[in-house]
Structure formats: C-alpha cells, structure tokens
Amino acid sequence: MEASMPKRKEPGKSLRVKVISMGNAEVGKSCIIKRYCEKRFVSKYLATIGIDYGVTKVQVRDREIKVNIFDMAGDPFFYEVRNEFYKDTQGVILVYDVGQKDSFDALDTWLAEMKQDLGPHGNMENIVFAVCANKIDCTKHRCVDESEGRLWAESKGFLYFETSAQTGEGINEMFQTFYLSIVDLCENGGKRPNTNSSASFTKEQADTIRRIRSSKDSWDMLGVKPGASRDEVNKAYRKLAVLLHPDKCVAPGSEDAFKAVVNARTALLKNIK
Ligand code: GTP
Ligand code: MG
C-alpha cells in the first residue's frame, strides 16, 4: 500500500486524485459535496445507497487536478460495499453532525474501519484528512463544541472545519484547503504536510483537556482523591497549571480547561481546613 500515492508529476501538469467521504449516516456528507460541486442544498434526506461516484476538476495553483470523489453511505448495512473503496485514497472528508454526539464519538470507529480495510501495510499517514463539524447552522441543538472537535482533529494532525451544507458556511474554505494540502502531499513525495497546530501541543496536554472536560467533580478534575489535603490539592493544581497555562499551551480548549482547574481548586480549598 505504500504505492497508494499518485506518481509525482512535473509542476503545472495535471494530477489525478481519489477522495472519499466518511462518517455516520445522515451527518451531511452528500450535502457537503453537493453544496461545493452543484452549489445547492437538498433538505430532504436521501440516503446514499452504498457509494455515489463523481468526477470533478479543480485548479490548485498552477495545477489542474482531476478529483474522483467516492461518497460513502454511513449506514453499517453498507459496510461490505464501502470496504472495497478505501484503498489508493489521497484525501478523506470525515464528517460529523455537531448536534449528534454519537456521530462525533464514532469518528475513531471510522478510522479503525479504514485502517482495517487497508490492511497491515496500509499507511494512513500519507492521506489528508479534513474533519467537518457539520450542521453548525443548527445552533440550538449543538452539543459538540468547536474546541472539542478541533482538539480531536488537530491532535491527530488532521485539518478541522466548521461547516454548514445548508448555508454554505465553511464549505469552500474546506475544499480549497483540502485540495491544496493534497497537492502539497503529492509534491512532497507522499508525506502529509505539517499543520501548524499538530506540532504545537503535546498528547499529554490534549489528553488532560479531555479528562478535565469529562471529570465528574472538582476532586476528579484535579486528579486527587476526595478528602485530599490542602497540600495535595495545591500540588495537583500546580502541575495542571504548568501544563495548561494559556501562555504555554495552545491546544484548543486549554483556556477553558485552565479556568475550570482554577475554579475547582478555589472550591476545594474553601472547604478544607
Ligand atoms: P448517508 O448517505 O445516509 O450516509 O447520509 P449523509 O451523511 O450523506 O447525509 P446527507 O447529506 O444525505 O444529509 C442528511 C440530512 O441532513 C438531510 O436531510 C440534509 O438536508 C441534512 N443536512 C445536511 N447538511 C446539513 C447542514 O449543514 N445543516 C442542516 N440543517 N441540515 C443538513
Ligand atoms: Mg450520503
């Protein structure tokens, strides 16, 4: 599978790439593609049956790219159809619905499905992933916020976009950056271009922010046992403050996590003699 890269070509020459869409059923994969390619939005849900295929040409810098788009069905029923199509892919549009937590939680399962189908020699490192946090127009139902989505995407070195296929927000920007990154990847001998943010925070910082977000109370947030002493609370606080201080940490959500830690410490110290 190392051979999944299209051959390096001279600058200015045309390039042919394969792009797939991935994500749970009904998150808006087909609508995102339709919005970009046909400049329209269909509000009625027409589930993709297995796979939809389309070809489009785009200009990136001095290159014309012929893009083969395979729009996958998200329903588990179509797994057998999907699994034929993962190989030889240069770009993945990975979509979730910001109003459906399940669709966000499922992103890891989608990556696992792809990895499994690529087999032991498959290399996900030479594929550009664009994560679309879709349906941002539905503000009332939103339950996955930007920093949570961005943290997940950027800690994996993926691109992240807030999109609405309905209003068109973020769609052009997403495709332009996505195609540009694919061309960079092809010209870079198959190595995914570094996104600034992927190199700018550590896994420990990302994991700590996630842990803080899901903590059940202030003890849990600081990572101390209920009934811990002032010293233990202060020690745990200092460790987290160093890790997450906004001057030091640029991971998405670090500022909120830092504030939450400060508040947790204040609340605990009030009640410890
Ligand atoms: P499968 O093909 O079954 O995997 O689904 P899909 O991910 O391709 O979803 P599709 O694009 O068909 O959209 C599902 C439903 O969500 C449709 O009713 C769309 O009109 C709606 N939808 C898609 N994108 C948006 C969006 O950005 N905002 C809103 N409000 N609705 C959207
Ligand atoms: Mg579809």
Image: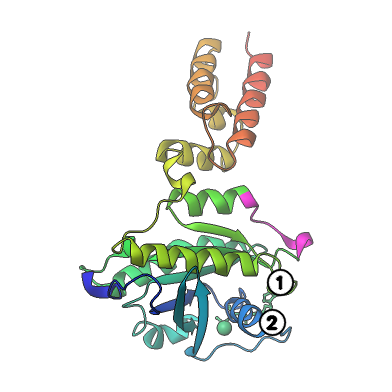
Relative to 118, is 200 above or below?
above
Relative to 249, is 135 above or below?
below
Give the labeled residue for mark 2.
39
Camera sees residue 77 = yes
For the residues labelled 1 and 2, the Cα–Cα distance comes to 8 Å
Residue beneath the point at 20% across and 68% down:
121
> Which residue range is magenta in the image?
138-146
Q: Is residue 144 magenta?
A: yes
Give the quarter of the image for residue 187. Answer: bottom left
Q: Are marks 1 and 2 in contact (CB under 8 Å)?
A: yes
Relative to 50, is 206 above or below?
above
Q: Amino acid at mark 1?
A: Gly
Figure quadrant of the C terminus: top right
- Out of 52 and 108, give the one closest to the viewer: 52
- Out of 270 and 173, give the one closest to the viewer: 173
Q: Amino acid at mark 2?
A: Lys
Give the labeled residue for mark 1.
168
